[in-house]
Image: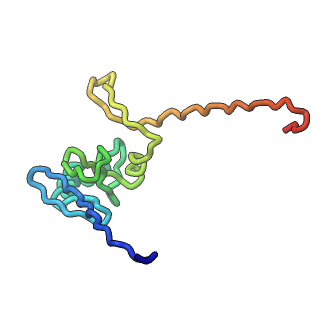
Amino acid sequence: MGLLDFKPVKMKSLKLKTPRLKGMEFSRTKEGRVRIPAKRKKEVREKYKYTCAYPRCKIKNPLDIHHKNMKSHDNRLANLELLCPTHHRIRHQKAFRKVVGTDPFTGKKRKRLVKKKPKTKKKKVRIKRTSKLFPW
């Protein structure tokens, strides 16, 4: 055998698993994301009355559909919400976290986004050199 002679190696092809939820047919994009069916998009828009789902936001156009659990293949109606681009970006930022609590006046459960506390940076300890030859 020469230096450039080699045998071809068989590679197994990766198969993406399509999630199986009742009564739903799935199609995938080139990136591997599961598309939201048009019927489900319409249901989401009607559920939120064509306005942003963020509290006190009344923007009607343009609106995005957001996955609450951040899993793009989970297209259940309970997992989808309609948001304006600004609030959609806020939901995806890692600087915010969701807080669930009860309203002290009404006693109802309330969800809201709160900024996370910044992490404190540890100070680096510098070792002093005692050598007179190299003072730095």
**Number of numbered discs on residues:** 0
Residue 28: horizontal and vertical position, in percent?
A: 23, 63
- Going by the picture, which residue comes out furthest to the left? 23
Q: Is residue 4 left or right of residue 41?
A: right
Quadrant into which the N terminus falls: bottom left
Q: Which residue is at the front of the view, 54 or 92?
A: 92
Q: Position of residue 23 (x, y in %)?
A: 9, 54
Closest to the observer: 128 or 30? 128
Rendering quarter of residue 112: top left
Residue 92 in the image: above or below residue 5: above
State which quadrant residue 85 falls in: bottom left
Quadrant in which the C terminus appears = top right
Question: Which residue lies at the image location 90% right of the left edge and 33% below the top edge?
Answer: 132
Q: Residue furthest right?
A: 132
Residue drawn where x is 44% and y is 46% of the image = 93
* Between 69 and 80, the one nearer to me in the picture: 69
- Residue at left 23%, top 60%? 15
Q: Position of residue 64 (x, y in %)?
A: 32, 56
Which of the colour schemes (rainbow, by chain, secondary structure, one colour) is used? rainbow
Q: Residue at x 70, y 30 (%)?
A: 125
